[in-house]
Image: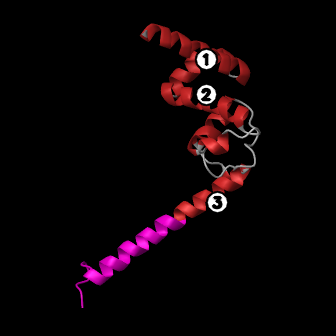
């Protein structure tokens, strides 16, 4: 028999096969969750909800995988394209700046996501011009 802390070669092989099977099962579950999400992006009110949907899954509202992790094919459907772009714009700016700087920079636009998106695009254009 093997020592309790050490695994014999057959046990190592079994453990690695089990790990591979668990990883495959996990990937299949994520894929099925993603297919369930594909129908549509849930509605959201306010910039924090946009950021949350972009960065984190929200199964309670039908979003099992964060939008940031959606493949291009799924986010570019006619139904999802516009919602995805808005959430990606606000979410990626939030990620880039961090919460404190994001809130400080865009404090006056937090109530209107359309104005916030326009302000973010303007700031990004300004940053590009400074780099050039």
Kindly report the distance in space between the C-alpha atoms of the residues bearing marks 2 and 1: 8 Å
**Residue 88, position as x, y percentages in the image:** 61, 32
Q: Main secondary structure of the magenta part?
A: helix
The residue at 67%/20% (across/down) is: 116
Residues at badges 2 and 3 in contact (C-beta under 8 Å)? no
Instruction: Give the residue at mark 2.
Output: 89
Q: Which span of residues is magenta-colored?
A: 1-25
> Could you say which quadrant of the image residue 20 lies in?
bottom left
How crowded pointer 3 is (Cα within 10 Å; few <14, some 14-19, many 20+) is rated as few
Task: Give the SS element for disc 3.
Answer: helix
Q: Residue at x 67, y 16 (%)?
A: 118
Mark 2 or 3, nearer chain start: 3
Q: Which residue is mark 3?
A: 32
Which residue is more in the foreground, 38 or 65? Answer: 38
Q: Quadrant of the C terminus?
A: top left
Q: Determine whether, in the image, residue 132 is placed left or right of residue 62.
A: left
Name the outermost residue toward the bottom.
1
Q: Is residue 12 left or right of residue 92?
A: left
Residue 66: which disc?
none
Secondary structure at badge 1 equals helix
Mark seen at residue 121: 1
Tag 3 near tag 1, CB within 8 Å: no
């Amino acid at each position: 028999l093997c020592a309790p802390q050490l695994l014999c070669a057959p046990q190592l092989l079994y453990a690695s096969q089990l790990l591979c099977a668990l990883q495959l099962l996990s990937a299949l579950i994520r894929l099925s969750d993603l297919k369930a999400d594909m129908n549509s992006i849930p509605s959201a009110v306010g910039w924090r909800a946009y950021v949350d949907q972009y960065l984190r899954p929200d199964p309670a509202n039908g979003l099992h995988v964060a939008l940031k992790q959606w493949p291009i094919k799924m986010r570019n459907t006619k139904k999802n394209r516009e919602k995805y772009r808005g959430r990606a714009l606000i979410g990626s700016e939030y990620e880039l700046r961090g919460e404190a700087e994001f809130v400080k920079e865009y404090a006056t636009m937090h109530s209107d996501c359309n104005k916030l998106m326009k302000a973010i695009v303007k700031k990004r254009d300004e940053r590009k011009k400074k780099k050039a």
